[in-house]
Amino acid sequence: MCGIIGYSGSENAAERIVSGLKSLEYRGYDSAGIAAFEENKVRIIKTVGRVSALEHRIDECGGIRSGCGIGHTRWATHGAPNDINSHPQVSGRVVLVHNGIIENYHELKTELISQGVSFVSETDTEVAAAVIDSEYNKAGDPLKAILAAMPKLTGSYAFGILFKDVPGVIYSVKKGSPLIVGVTDNGGFISSDTSAILRYTKKYISLENGEIAVIKGASTEVYNSRGESVKKEILTAKWDAAAAEKGGYSHFMLKEIHEEPEAVKKTLGIRNRHGYIDFEDDGITVEQLKNINFLRIVACGTAMHAGLYAKYAIEKMARIPVIVEVASEFRYSDPILSDKDTVLIISQSGETADSLEALRIAKSKGARTIAVVNVIASSIAREADNVIYTYAGPEISVASTKAYTVQVATLCAFAFELAYSKGRLTEQDLMYYSKIILHDLCEAIEKVISDEERIRGIAQELYDNENVFFIGRSLDCALVQEASLKLKEISYIHSEAYAAGELKHGTISLITNGTPVISLATVPEIYEKTMSNIVEVVTRGGKAFVVCGSDFPDNSAILYRYELPEIDRMFMGLVGITAMQLFAYYMSVLRGNDVDKPRNLAKSVTVE
Ligand code: F6R
């Protein structure tokens, strides 16, 4: 949440900063700002609203001619989104942009006020700037000031810092929030992620907690928390600039749904070395899997919903009990874990604060941790005992789509491998399922995508409703949770997902004349039960829409049915989710919403 960027070098800093902020906008977009050295003086322009509003304000102010500056796009935590609370924040000689939260800002502020420091904003960031400034006044050296300030600041942060009397230099430090340093021949960047610098460079350094980067043109020095110079490896980003752009689609979300088949092939094709998918290259052997007798899956939001799918697949195929927990609850539940347990963390960004903390708790209790992560070298990926990377490419739209699909496909492959280790599947079975994932699944998703116009037609029927309900049983019950989340987060329509059999126990009272109820039906063994629930809903005035297998019985109660392409039933529900993602997308478009940046949300939730 919040994105920071900075550039120091011989090229136009403002252009690079604004371009970077546009890529980082998915991290927060309620205000934006820039600070840059112009003729050795720091000039600050900031505004409430989107990066485009900042760009406009910069133009109005006659542009910025600078080779060194920092920028910020904000998701407000402390203080309302307004010009004063937006970043950069200034205290004395320190100008600072921040991603994270300073938890002890209130005590620090009280202490600083008692020392005569005054504040203009409500932000924790201004307090951090004041702490560094106060240390700078004592030490007279920027690096020493940052080193002295760090132990005083509790919480998480990635800072980009300018010292007013040290022109051309960016100081940057991180603890708990993501930060990378981009390397080019003409200058250096700091950024919350690689997508913001891909247009200029693929070379970057990943900073560890407590490390400080000092960027002066093309020269970058990194110091550890004792102030000693450290040598860092220069990494190469696997994504290119095109992957982080819309490529002709009207929204990133639509582009990312279209990328699903490719993302599945890319992620699991490279693990298909013996005619079947395995995880040996990820350091997960059949021998290790054999010892797993119980699994806890911990994640947030859509990633947690991928975990619900995994629970179904693992319990069905490997007959191992699985508990799926929301990370924000898990971390405060004093979980009962020992060194005999395995905890699986799922995260697209690899930076979600609750999931990261859940991972640390699981490790501290001796459990083995396996992370399924999309962002290379992210915090969760670095700290887990094993990491299974998904190669979905950058996911820019706030609503997760391709990352979910790839997580589920990967976790299903993991379930099959687990079942194999337990002697419940043969090598032949693994080959069969690997072919289904790499071929049939991708083909079925493509078919649904080619049906986009029909799905848009259904959205056209429903987009002016204020309530939509989803129902399903068994795996479909887990899946409608994701369908409902997708719809509500981007269309702002009130939507709930229920176990179809639970309706009679209370929720059916919400069904009134004309309420749309969308059923997902992909599990043939319980078709009849789902059908009874559909009839119950229609009897009470509900309008029944069904997304189902072609073998789902017909009934006059159904107003509209959308049949999914035939595929092994372990995967039909996943294909159904692609249809639901497209449905949510068009509902949002038809309601005139900002699809990729829904209100109040940010993509990477790096605060609690
Ligand atoms: C919803 C969505 C969120 C994320 C959640 C976890 O569309 O994207 O619910 O799934 O914030 O994020 P990651 O996977 O980055 O840990």
Image: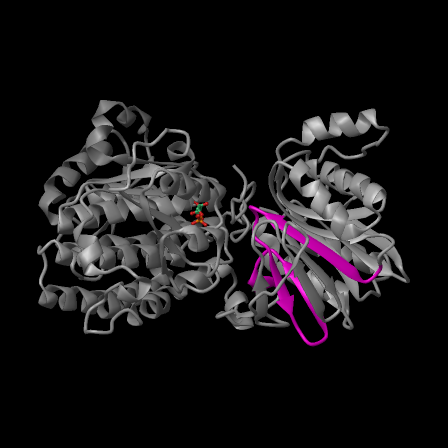
Q: Is residue 243 visible?
A: yes
Quarter of the image for residue 473 reads top left
Query: Which residue shows up at 65% across the image and 44% down it?
Result: 30
Q: Is residue 172 magenta?
A: yes
Q: Is residue 177 magenta?
A: yes
Query: Which residue shows up at 76% across the image and 72% down it?
Result: 11
Q: Is residue 586 visible?
A: no
519 left or right of 592 in image = left
> Residue 392 in the image: x percent, y percent?
41, 63
> Residue 349 in the image: x percent, y percent?
47, 53
Q: Taking 8 as reference, is 157 above or below it?
A: above
Q: How is the image coloured?
A: one colour
Q: Taking 86 as reference, is 573 above or below it?
A: below
304 left or right of 558 in image = right
Quarter of the image for residue 198 reads bottom right
| Nearest the eye: 454 or 388 | 388
> Residue 132 in the image: x percent, y percent?
76, 42
Write the start and end of the magenta stretch as one range: 167-196
| Nearest the eye: 182 or 300 | 182
> Residue 113 in the image: x percent, y percent?
81, 27
